[in-house]
Amino acid sequence: MSFKDYYKILGLETNKVSLDEIKLAYREQAKKYHPDINMGDSYSEEKFKEVNEAYKILSDSKTRKKYDRSWFIYTERKRKIQEKETEEKKTFKEKLMSIFFGINPIKKKNVEEKRLTLKGENIETEVDISIIEAFNGTKKKLKLLAVDGKTRTFSLDIPAGIQNEDRIRFVGQGKPGKNGGKNGDLLVRIFIKDSKEFKLNGADIYKEVNITPWEAALGTKLTVESIDGEVSLIIPKGTQSGERFTIKGKGYKIGRGLRGNFYIITKIVVPKKLSIEEEKLYKKLKELQNCDTKVVVNK
């Protein structure tokens, strides 16, 4: 059975990564090969299984530690084989050049190294946006201090439905290359922040709705503002604080028209101030409840 490089499956080049980096890599690969997005694609289905298998092993500290021992042996063996093959090809080529052309490969190598072009380093930064901005799409102005000390302004066109921690790339806007090499890129990572009304968890949106004690006891019909319009909600009799109601397909955007769920959490709120009439009614309710209460005495 061939060895599976779980780090490579998740798009990681090394095992020197944190758990957060593993989680981020998993989300990116799972989204890329998800069956809902790649319907009928057997290759994507198989890749999705491998991605989940890799995450299961690497997200657990015990199984990851055990796997890393095998991974190290595998990668070291692979590296040594590749180095040996490269060295053999290099030696053979140098011998031919020396025999037939009288070229000193060492001298030529030094000259080539001096002329080696290097791509510039990437620059990374972060931008926070609200969940509503992320859902609808938005434009932002980003000001950064360039290498020459001058301030540069970039226009960020953030698409609707961008996923949390996705990156927007500005090609060639990073640090300059060397010896004619290309400039690096500017990478802007987007972080979606919860609002007072809405909280994002994966593709699901949560909202807390206040209801009065009498609405909870007697039941009621509410109109609740979701992230993209109003929804109707029936609160049944005897609803408790903290109960969750699900509106399917009204959550955050996943892609290709798919969305998560919208969860409404009830919170029973007692009025801070009562009128004289309200206070009388509460006292009457208390008396009625006391009359209905049966006390059982253990013998």
Image (cartoon, helix red, strand yellow):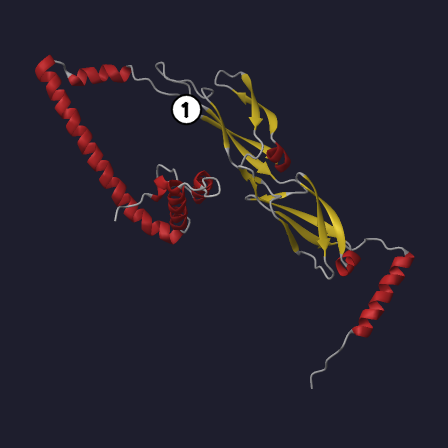
Q: Position of residue 219 (x, y in %)?
A: 76, 58
Q: Give residue 249's quadrant in the image.
A: top right
Q: Is residue 15 visible?
A: no
Q: Residues within 10 Å of mark 1 (few under 14, many from 20)?
A: some
Residue type, label 1? Glu
**Drawn side of residue 249 relative to residue 268, left or right:** left
Q: Position of residue 278 (x, y in %)?
A: 88, 58
Q: Residue at x 32, y 49 (%)?
A: 67
Against 122, residue 73 (above or below) is: below
**Drawn side of residue 65 relative to residue 77, left or right:** right
Q: Is residue 107 visible?
A: yes
Q: Residue at x 32, y 47 (%)?
A: 68
Instruction: Looking at this view, name the residue that lies furthest to the right.
Output: 276
Against 259, residue 233 (above or below) is: below
Instruction: Looking at this view, name the residue that lies furthest to the bottom.
Output: 299
Q: Residue at x 75, y 78 (%)?
A: 295
Instruction: Looking at this view, name the residue that lies furthest to the left.
Output: 99
- In this view, the residue in front, 212 or 38, is 38
- Dot 1: element: loop
**Drawn side of residue 279 relative to residue 25, left or right:** right
Which quadrant does the C terminus fall into? bottom right
Q: Residue at x 44, y 20 (%)?
A: 175
- In this view, the residue in front, 48 or 20, is 48
Q: Position of residue 47 (x, y in %)?
A: 38, 42
The residue identified by callout 1 is: 121
